[in-house]
Image (cartoon, rainbow, N blue to C red):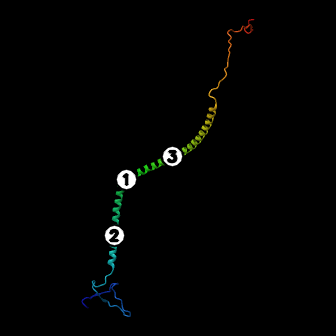
Amino acid sequence: MSGLEVAVTGPAPATARPQAAPGAGKTPASTTRKPPALEPRRPLHLAVLAGASTALYAASLAGVTALQSSTDAARVEDQAPVSAAADRLTAGHDRLEDAVTAAEGHYSDAASAYDSLTRKLAAMEASLAANANRMSAIGGAANSLPTKVSLPTVSRTVTKTVSKPTVRSTTGASGKP
């Protein structure tokens, strides 16, 4: 044995067992093993490191999520008055929009009535113009008439009767002859 080799009795671990050469018979009962510092390292530590870092990352994400959730809840609670004001503003906007829509309907009705009135006024102006033409024709004819016409005098006589005529008759209505 050299200074670096250690004698181990019993079977070697499964990962450290040397392969028997083909055709070799039995393995000896005692084999020599290298000290643990000289054995090739297994990558188990990398798996443990990956698992631990994943667990730490998950825990930190859970913590951040909890903090964010509580921050969001506080923000929602702080913004409740703003939300109520926004709701009131929205309701006011809706009322204003309804009022504008109603005013638009009233304006449309008034514009229709104005258009109808405009047509009626135009017809009345045409009628007045035709009437003015007739009046000027009548005025022209009236201007051609003499300004003074002599009418004959009419005499009238009235006779008055002052006394009543005498009547001589009797009726048998009262029972007296």
Q: CA distance from mark 3 to mark 1?
A: 36 Å
Horizontal side of residue 61 vs 99, given as left or right: left
The C terminus - image quarter? top right
- Where residue 69 appears, as percent x and y from the top left, is 36, 61
> Image quadrant of residue 44?
bottom left
Horizontal side of residue 139 vs 74, given as left or right: right
Residue under numbered circle 2: 57
Horizontal side of residue 1 vs 128, given as left or right: left
> Image quadrant of residue 77?
bottom left
Looking at marks 2 and 1 on the same chain, the residue that comes earlier in the sequence is marked by 2
The N terminus - image quarter? bottom left
> Image quadrant of residue 32?
bottom left
Q: CA distance from mark 2 to mark 1?
A: 37 Å
Dot 3: within a 10 Å radius of its alpha carbon, few (fewer than 14), some, or many (20 or more) residues?
Answer: few
- Where residue 103 appears, as percent x and y from the top left, is 49, 46
Which mark is drawn over residue 111?
none
Q: Residue, x 63% and y 32% (percent of image)?
A: 144
Question: Could you tell me the amino acid type at mark 1?
Answer: Val
Looking at marks 3 and 1 on the same chain, the residue that comes earlier in the sequence is marked by 1
Q: CA distance from mark 2 to mark 3?
A: 67 Å
Placement of 157 over or under 51, stated as above or below: above
Residue under numbered circle 3: 107
Residue under numbered circle 1: 82
